[in-house]
Image (spheres, grey):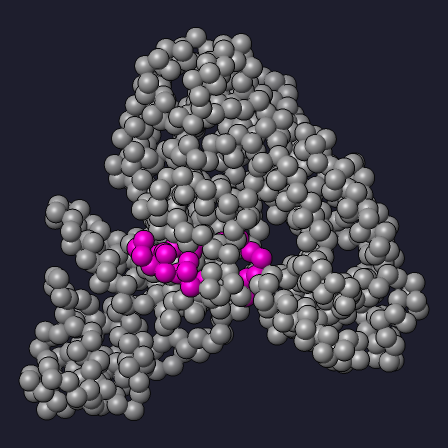
Amino acid sequence: MTHNKQNIENAMLNTLKTVFGFHTFRPNQEAIIKSILNKQDAFAAMPTGGGKSLCYQLPARMMQGTAIVISPLISLMKDQVDSARGNGIAAAYMNSSLSHQEVSDLYRMLKEGKIELLYIAPERFAMPNFLEALKEVPISLFAIDEAHCISEWGHDFRPDYLSLSIISKTFPDAPIAAFTATATSKVQEDIRKKLGLRSPFVVRASFNRPNLFYQVERKTDAELQILEFLKAHPAESGIIYRTTRDSVMELVDFLIENGISALPYHAGLATEIRNKNQDAFNRDEALVIVATIAFGMGIDKSNVRFVVHADLPKNIEGYYQETGRAGRDGEPAHCLLLFGRGDIPKLRYFIDQITDPAERSIALEKLNEVIGFATHNVCRRKRLLGYFGEEYASDNCGGCDICSDVHEQFDITRDAQIVLSAIFRTQERFGIRHIVDIVIGSDTKRIRALQHDKIKTYGAGRDKDKGHWRFIVDELFAQDVIRQEGDPYPVLKLTEKGKNILYGKEIVTALKKEETKAKALAKGDIAGYDTALFEILRSVRKRIAEEEQVPPFVVFSDKTLHEMCRYYPAMPSEMRRISGVGDKKLEQYGNAFLDEIKRYLSKNPGIQIPYPQSNDNCAGISRPREKKIGETVEETYRLLRQGLLIEEIARERNLALSTIAAHIERLIQKGRDIDIDRLIEPAKRQRIEKLFLNLQEWNLTPVVESLDGAASYEDARLARAWLRRGECRESYDHTQ
């Protein structure tokens, strides 16, 4: 038995390496796969990006027969199949997009045992003719993706999923593996019951996504705030969520007017337009998609670098799912929520339309939870995980605005007492707007009519603006000093804590936040990989993807490219050690990337290959090096200080001009004293900077080509570094 167990483990590791190109399993993957190989049902609650697809694709390759994957969105099946085929797995999908002949061919291939992995929608499974055909096919396993769709407690309930309850009885010998990214225990139990899982192996993984940076920013002007955010994330792919279709279209128009390639996605668009826009986003033809929650479940794009919520989500579950679209490749990603209390009445309006009182009460409770998440000055990650019943051990995650900002506690007791007094003296019968108007001494018709200009608190806060008092109100909500009651026009009430503060028995403090520095999102060389090479390899990836008509991430993920740009593999044996490069992909794409890397190394002979760190998934590339990168950069700086120009330094050090330019770029990012005007003419630099700003990306090639020989790549690199020096310095310092 022990010998057999060892054989299985060796076979699993070999398949992991040769087929998928990975050298170690991610948390929980190995245990889930073992249970499936042992013909045991499995239930896995795993976060988005947790690597669930490997949990059924690897057994599909190792087991006899066909693995049936039930997925709710047919629009993504092609990408999932392309990805599996890219790893050498015989995969296919059967859905309504196929012709009658194509479906017939698939049935034939199934019976002939030529398909290892078949993706279907639940509607297909419910068809009697399909079910009868499936009974004639050896089935290795059933994988139920987005399994929460079977639960009426889930946020994406699909009645068609209920037909899956017959799997365990109809195919008693085939193990069932159910996967969900929904963390609530109620939904999890409902899934297991309705699918009829038989003594399943259960995994409840941590729902923490350490690569995601969570930030909440007070909403002032959403469009301008988003534009500023996008300019700080050039050439990055991301999703922006809005509540309504109209707000989606308005934001898209605004972004396009400001030079951002954005596309809309909402249920009001024709199906062919939605599919076209989603496809363009997947293929990196449009960097930004602006969407309602219709764009959600099943998004499989791995290189989404940010998710912005321009409006308040209606619940924590939805927020978690939507932010989970970012950073599926494990690389750093940014989740920004713009919070304004003006969003709350809109959401309450939708809640008020719910006829069932119990359901309406639950929806209101969920809304209050997401308001608390946005307003409480405690670790965002701790609050988020706590909602799902998971305790985060640390009080400082280092990966949210609360934990990464510089904070100062300050006493707001006096201001709180002014607000509380206004609420108390008006008999707790008025809402936020009226109370703030009283505090700042507004001369409104309503205040005069009610004689609220006669109360002691009237105008007590006129020395501060309305924004400050809204901040105080938000803090009092967040700290359970006040609450709202009443429907549909809620009024403010004092809690017991609020009464104590009003009468001077307690004090109340708030956190004063300085500018958020998302240190986790360091870019370029700062992030530990060669940005210039990354741009080159990304172009190669895009060309291959266009030729094969697949999204770029199907060829290689950003994470895999980053690793190539960190270790510079120059031979097939070295490329094989890069995470995400299996035998099939090495055979298909290896030479194209190796050629570019070798060409790059020949042009930049001063590049030294770093040794892999112990926590790298890369198995390691060992080539001798002479100096640490920091040492060779410092040598360039020493010669700059002596007054040498770039060309002279290159000759002195016997290095390529591009290498010296890269050194100077690093020095600028570090904030070193560089006389840029001595290295590049000011007029030329300003011209290059303008092009970068107009193009809204940091790629060197379009800029150099636009200048038609008037500037070199070295000129463009220096101008780019000088333009970005402010945004890079802080992050760079933290990495040293």
Please provide percent x and percent y for residue 714: 78, 65
Determine which quarter of the picture holds residue 491: bottom left
485 horizontally vs 407: left or right: left
Q: How far from the left and from the top, in percent, is residue 452?
A: 11, 86
Whether residue 214 is visible here, answered yes or no, is no
* Residue occupying image coordinates x 58% and y 67%: 694
Q: Is residue 477 visible?
A: yes
Q: How many numbered marks, from 0 up?
A: 0
Work out which quarter of the rendered image holds the C terminus and state it.
bottom right
Does the magenta segment cover residue 225? no
Residue at x 54% of width, y 18% of height: 115
For image coordinates 81% across by 39% down, the residue present is 571
Residue 254 highlighted magenta (yes or no)? yes
Residue sitting nearer the eye, 574 or 494: 574
565 or 260, nearer to the observer: 260
User: Residue reaching furthest front?
Assistant: 708
The quadrant of the picture occupied by the N terminus is top right
> Would you identify the image quadrant in which residue 312 lies?
bottom left
Q: Is residue 232 left or right of residue 125?
A: right
In the rendered image of this protein, does residue 728 appear above or below residue 249?
A: below
Q: Is residue 303 left or right of residue 569?
A: left
The stretch of residues the image draws in magenta is 232-255
How far across and how far down the image is residue 189, in percent? 31, 34
282 to 736, vertically: above or below: above
